[in-house]
Amino acid sequence: MIDRQYEKSEVILIGLLTIYCVALVVGMVAYVFYEYDMLMGEDGLNDAVLLHLVVAVGVLASVMRGASSLFEDVGKGTFDPRWSLSVLMRPVEGAALAVVVYFFCRSLLLVLGLEVGEVNPWGFLTIAGIAGMFSHKAGDGLRERFGRLFTDPPPTGGAAAQ
């Protein structure tokens, strides 16, 4: 543990990042409660509202993870202002990954032939939360795997081996 005194500008930045995180959490929780009543319409599941909630839950989960990292770094005395953009952009990354995972799961259900009425919205919202919470690690893992998938294999045999 590093015993560190933060400069005034760093304290202001930490305060602003904290306010940003709290505002996003409160806003997303309020939005989820507001939209949740409209999730089940007269005709069953409302897909547009479900997509809105997936985005909101992805943002909420990624903000919680970003705030946790921020507070841990400040508490340990290892906060580096250069990483502030990571806290600011994490909700965007979480929302985007939640939407991609939602579309993937939704297309998988279409392939399996399930009807819209058979879809569990809680499952989608849970997966969106997990995707948002681990969006940073998931993005790195996907980048690594797709990088290996789309690179040319090293040459074997022939003149290259000699």
Image (cartoon, rainbow, N blue to C red):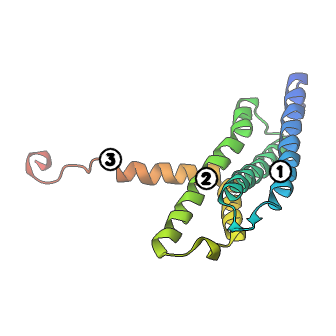
Residue 156 percent location from the top left of the image: 17, 53
Identified at 49% across, 75% down, the residue is 113
Residue 160 percent location from the top left of the image: 13, 46
Mark 1 nearby-residue class (10 Å; few <14, some 14–19, many ≥20): some
Amino acid carrying mark 1 in the image: Tyr
Identified at 87% across, 39% down, the residue is 18
Position of 84 relative to 34 (above/below): above
Q: Mark 3 points at which residue?
A: 151
Amino acid carrying mark 2 in the image: Val
Q: Name the residue under label 2.
A: 99
Q: First in sequence: mark 2 or mark 1?
A: 1
Identified at 67% across, 49% down, the residue is 94
| Residue 1 seen anywhere in this rendered image of the structure | no
Q: In this rendering, which labeled residue sits more in front, label 3 or label 2?
A: 2
Nearer to us in this view, 85 or 34: 34
State left or right for residue 151 relative to residue 53. Answer: left
Q: In this rendering, which labeled residue sits more in front, label 3 or label 1?
A: 1
Label pair 3/1, CB-CB below 8 angstroms: no
Q: Mark 1 points at which residue?
A: 31
Q: What element carries label 3?
A: loop
Q: Is mark 1 on a helix, strand or loop?
A: helix
Residue 125 percent location from the top left of the image: 71, 63
Q: In which quarter of the image is residue 127?
A: bottom right
Nearer to us in this view, 113 or 77: 113
Label pair 3/2, CB-CB below 8 angstroms: no
Mark 2 nearby-residue class (10 Å; few <14, some 14–19, many ≥20): many
Q: First in sequence: mark 3 or mark 2?
A: 2
| Residue 86 seen anywhere in this rendered image of the structure | yes
